[in-house]
Image (tube, rainbow, N blue to C red):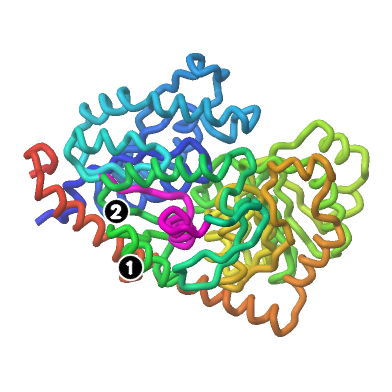
Amino acid sequence: MASPSANLHFVLFPLLAPGHMVPMIDMARILAHHGSNVTIITTPLNANRYKPIIARAVKANLKIQIIEVKLKLAEVGLPEGCESFDTLPSPELAYKLFTAINMLKEPSELVLRELSPAPSCIISDSYITWTSDVAQTLDIPKLVFHGPGCFWLMCMHVVSTTNVLSGIESDSQPFVLPELPDRIEVTKLQLMGTSRIDLTDLSGFRSQIQEREKYSYGFVVNSFDELEPEYVKELAKAKDKKVYCLGPVSLCNKDDLDIAERGNKAAVNEHDCLEWLDGKDPGSVMYICLGTLTRVPTEQVIELGLGLESTNIPFIWCIRNETEELQRWFSESGFEERVGERGLIIHGWAPQVMILSHRALGGFITHCGWNSTLEAVCAGLPMVTWPHLFDQFLNEKFITEVLKIGVRIGIDIPADTGEQDKAGALVKKEEIKAAIECLMNAGEEGERRRKRAQELAEMAKKAMEEGGSSHLNVITMIQDVTEQLAKNMKPSHLVV
């Protein structure tokens, strides 16, 4: 008798941003490994980014495909090629891309109606709210994918369901979030993760998402039960829905090419990168990457470089979104010549999972994006936390106060407040040096951080192994979707 998964066809709708696309591509492959048919709906530019890894999956006999739908970019006032949030010339254009995404409902529904076998379940990014309507029209279950973990989801839940914000007048006034397993103190700015949206507007937007979530069957989360056990339970109870932690999904990458090219083609030769790492002592190297969407002011990037130079610690520094001014500084300052073989600078996309998993790594300066956070956890690495936007400030709280595997760089306001433009570098080289040395140098507290990080790495690996919590959650999810379909099934939903 065929397993239930062999009869299912999952259709995935990722948000058009690397931080959301990459884990959903991994998730698609995990579902296909369990025997399900999987279709990913995305745009031509995004499809082109991930075609190599999907082609390798197909070659390995996984039933997975990408179907392209076209954005009406000209209609919303965007130039050609702006199909992902990381390709926008300016962050202010994000709302136009959201408008274009909202226009994909009808063409996407047409695609789903023509799929064979017929779709059994939609897994949609939470920001693509119209997929609830499509799922209802097709009479199939929908699962919601959120980029961050259960801790962040619970923080957002208590903000929207309690009166915690009443009486908090200042955006920078600290207050404690109620009804959480841990004492978490935040400000309005840290909750918003941006100064460009009023918290009232943000709460309204979150309310829209939560309203559409009512029509979903449950949540899929890139996390694992052992990482945030109390928050997984509290979220399921608070939402009265199933919560399936299926991660860390990055660990599904076993092939060297899949690991090296996860997310995009690397801007460095993987062999050269590994050779450089092989020449360094175990646990001696600091890796620095501040994300795909973060636009760090040139003055701050330079200050970061000077901080790295002053430590005498070997480092790999991934720099994206370079300005002409920064390129000129690199060519004229002699920085690369001074650090010499001690530093490897990657101008563009880095093979992050490959780097973090190398034995030479000892720490990670991160923007606290959820994917990067999980990848550090999988590698057993403590972190220097440097949040910039969105969920990153709450993720920092989770890293430093709940998991206790991080050292704060000391930033308390989002990068788009304008303060960096006024003051140049908000974090000075001396502070950067101090945070790095605090993380990397031995000491009782440092040893506890490192031991805890290594324990979490073991838990992560076990969760993804056969019989582990995440592996079992995938099986349970497949069974639950099959049962849900059976309740309101049209004969075409399952292959008999």
Please give left or right for residue 137 compared with residue 240 in the image: left
Span of residues in magenta: 142-165
Q: Is residue 124 visible?
A: yes
Instruction: Identify which residue, 386 or 111, lies in the foreground.
Output: 386
Towards the viewer: 351 or 121: 121
Which residue does the image show at 48% across and 14% down from the upper left? 75
Q: Look at mark 1 in the image and give the residue it sits on.
A: 466
Quadrant of the rendered image containing residue 392? bottom right
- Check the picture and name the quadrant holding the C terminus: top left
Nearer-the-camera pick, 154 or 386: 154
Q: Is residue 158 magenta?
A: yes
Q: Is residue 334 left or right of residue 408?
A: right
Work out which residue is located at the far top of the displayed protein and give it. Answer: 74
Secondary structure at numbered mark 2: strand
Q: Is residue 69 magenta?
A: no
Q: Position of residue 493 (x, y in %)?
A: 13, 40
Rendering coords of residue 248 (x, y %): 45, 60
Q: Is residue 217 left or right of residue 392?
A: left
> Dot 2: within a 10 Å radius of its alpha carbon, few (fewer than 14), some, or many (20 or more) residues?
many
Q: Position of residue 397 (x, y in %)?
A: 59, 64
The residue carrying mark 2 is 218
Camera sees residue 353: no
Q: Is the residue 280 above or below the residue 187 in the image?
A: below
Q: Earlier in the sequence, mark 2 or mark 1?
A: 2
Q: Residue at x 82, y 36 (%)?
A: 327
Q: In the rendered structure, which amino acid carries the disc numbered 1?
A: Glu
Looking at the image, residue 212 lies above or below residue 458? above
Which percent across, then down, holds residue 430?
A: 87, 61
Q: Amino acid at mark 2?
A: Gly
Which circle marks residue 87 in the picture? none
